[in-house]
Image: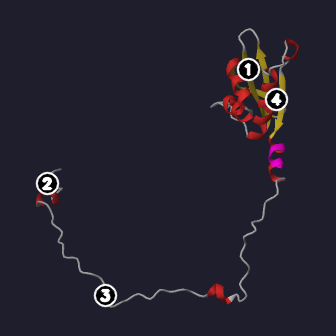
Amino acid sequence: MKQKYSISRNDEKDELIIREYAELDKEILSFLCEEVFKGEAVRAAAEKGRDHLIAALRTRNLYPPALFMGKIAEAAAALFGPDTSSDENQPAELFFNDFDFLSHISEVPKAVPEDIEEEPEDIDELLEDEIEDFDDKEGINPINTSIKIADDDVLDIEDEI
């Protein structure tokens, strides 16, 4: 699925606006959601670092994968950075394709653990069973409790109908 994120800044209200679009039909992007963040909250999170900004921008409705969210956070930080002027407040549009995301994941090499035990010299060692011997002389202890049944009326269900 293809996705588009529009990141813009509203200077009048000092807000960050993120709009999410997705390709639900072939070659047609549909609007999914819009999230509005206060500028001071975005600046404060950006000062603490990238991870804090990502956490501040994620909501119940806007929760893209980390690979996408990192780029969205970079665009948001560029809009609300310390050296931004009104000329630099151009909206950013980010396009993502899930296929690129999945291919990025598959490129990560799998690490082979180094603590693998050596193979046993004799394969028959694997087939040996370790059986514990139980003492059959004891048997089962008898249960000395009796089951008590309540009144006979409880068993006569037909009479109550």
Q: Secondary structure at mark 2?
A: loop
Percent coordinates x, y for residue 105 in the rendering: 80, 50
SS type, badge 4: strand
Q: CA distance from mark 4 to mark 3?
A: 77 Å
Query: Residues under labels 1 and 2: Cα distance?
Result: 73 Å
Which circle marks residue 17 in the picture?
A: 1
Q: Is residue 42 above or below residue 126?
A: above
Between disc 1 and disc 4, the foreground one is: 1
Q: Which residue is mark 3?
A: 138
Q: Residue furthest right?
A: 87
Q: Which residues are magenta?
A: 100-104
Q: Which circle's residue, 1 or 2, is located before the other in the chain?
A: 1
Of mark 2 and mark 3, the one earlier in the sequence is 3
Residue 137, by quadrant, is bottom left
Pointer 4 residue:
28
Q: Amino acid at mark 4?
A: Ile
Could you give the CA–CA distance between mark 1 and mark 4, rounded to whole angstroms?
22 Å
Which residue position is annotated with label 2? 159
Q: Amino acid at mark 1?
A: Ile
